[in-house]
Image (cartoon, helix red, strand yellow):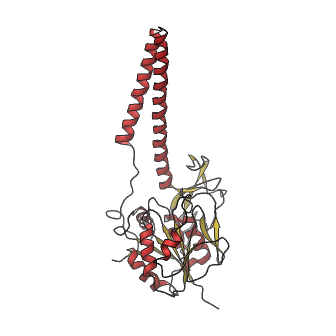
Amino acid sequence: MRPRRDLVLVGASAGGVPALRTLLGELPGELPMAMLVVVHTSPENPGGLADVLNRSSTYPVSYARDGAEIRYGHVYIAPPDFHLTTDDGHLAVRHGPRENRFRPAVDPLFRSAAASHGARVIAIVLSGSLDDGTHGLAVVKSHGGIAIVQSEEDALVPHMPVSAANAVAVDYVVPAAEMGGVIASLVGKSHRGMPRRTAPGSTTKKATSDPPPPADPTDIPTVLTCPDCGGALWELEDHGMLRYRCHVGHGVTSEGLARAQVQGIEESLWRATRALAEHAELRRRMASRAKSGRLEGLANAWEAEAEESERRADDIRRLLEDGQPRARVAGMRGARPARGAVQRG
């Protein structure tokens, strides 16, 4: 019987394409593996990433097609605005609800591959903002897979690899230029880890490629709302991480939800500023007409109301320009080191 080959998974966002090109260019040829890649892209993206990566890749690169059998010695990329997951040795390319506010998202790919390939998975988190990929990397580790993150110094936008390294017992923290060699030393080997045992009383669930809306009694309903659709959120304690999911299926980490709330507050305050400015303009027009009609008392009252609206708009604008809240992400320097990580470079 042919040995089960390895799946190498890569998740990246802002600043991740240069690192991905470096990784693909440094891979030795004829490794018994396939690579599945998710890069956060806009729905309006024309879809030229495969051509860009083919110029430097050791292996052929193409966009994934739904239902296609996974061919080893090939690199598959999630198309813009579609999630990429695995399904019984085949690719699944589905529109689906956004996760961590992205489509494609890294976590669904990592979870599905962990469920289908277990210890034959090597998962990599490259440069990017926020924390997509952190939960998925924890699932990969729980199924015996290997976790690799790009080193902070090498990443153009280090938030994604920093988040993963601080939350997961990653195996390697390395620059992109060294990842090809690390992968070559791992694929096809039989020494890979065993799945971690679930602690007694843990609410950790089996990895799935497309989780349904919450129905498990261990999921906790909250008063929080989904940043994508406004629906109620359920709280899930999953692989040691706090996550949220709505009825539709949108998923977000606690950090992602906090950042979405900060963004929502800012947007609401700007809308309030605009509404107050419009109200002041309307009252001034009304005051002008009142003066023309020699209704001085009414005109003065409306002028005063316009000035009050302008004062409130200025107060909000100063808050936004000088004191808007910003969620901070700890860097690897000074943060808790990745547990059990092998630091290279």
Marker count (numbered):
0
Q: Quadrant of the C terminus?
A: bottom left
Q: Position of residue 226 (x, y in %)?
A: 57, 49
| Residue projecting furthest to the front | 292
Q: Tell me what residue is drawn at x 64 percent, y 60 percent.
A: 96
Q: Tell me what residue is drawn at x 39 percent, y 36 percent.
A: 317
Q: Position of residue 297 (x, y in %)?
A: 45, 9
Q: Position of residue 139 (x, y in %)?
A: 54, 69
Q: Tell me what residue is drawn at x 46 percent, y 12 percent.
A: 291
* In front of the other: 278 or 200: 278
* In front of the other: 292 or 8: 292
Q: Position of residue 142 (x, y in %)?
A: 53, 72
In which image quadrant can residue 107 be found? bottom right
Q: Quadrant of the N terminus?
A: bottom right
Depicted 158 relative to depicted 58: above or below:
above
| Residue projecting furthest to the top | 294
* In front of the other: 220 or 122: 122
One can see residue 239 in this view: no
Q: Tell me what residue is drawn at x 50 percent, y 84 percent.
A: 187
* In front of the other: 191 or 108: 108
One can see residue 330 in this view: yes
Depicted 300 relative to depicted 323: above or below:
above
| Residue projecting furthest to the bottom | 1
| Residue projecting furthest to the left | 334
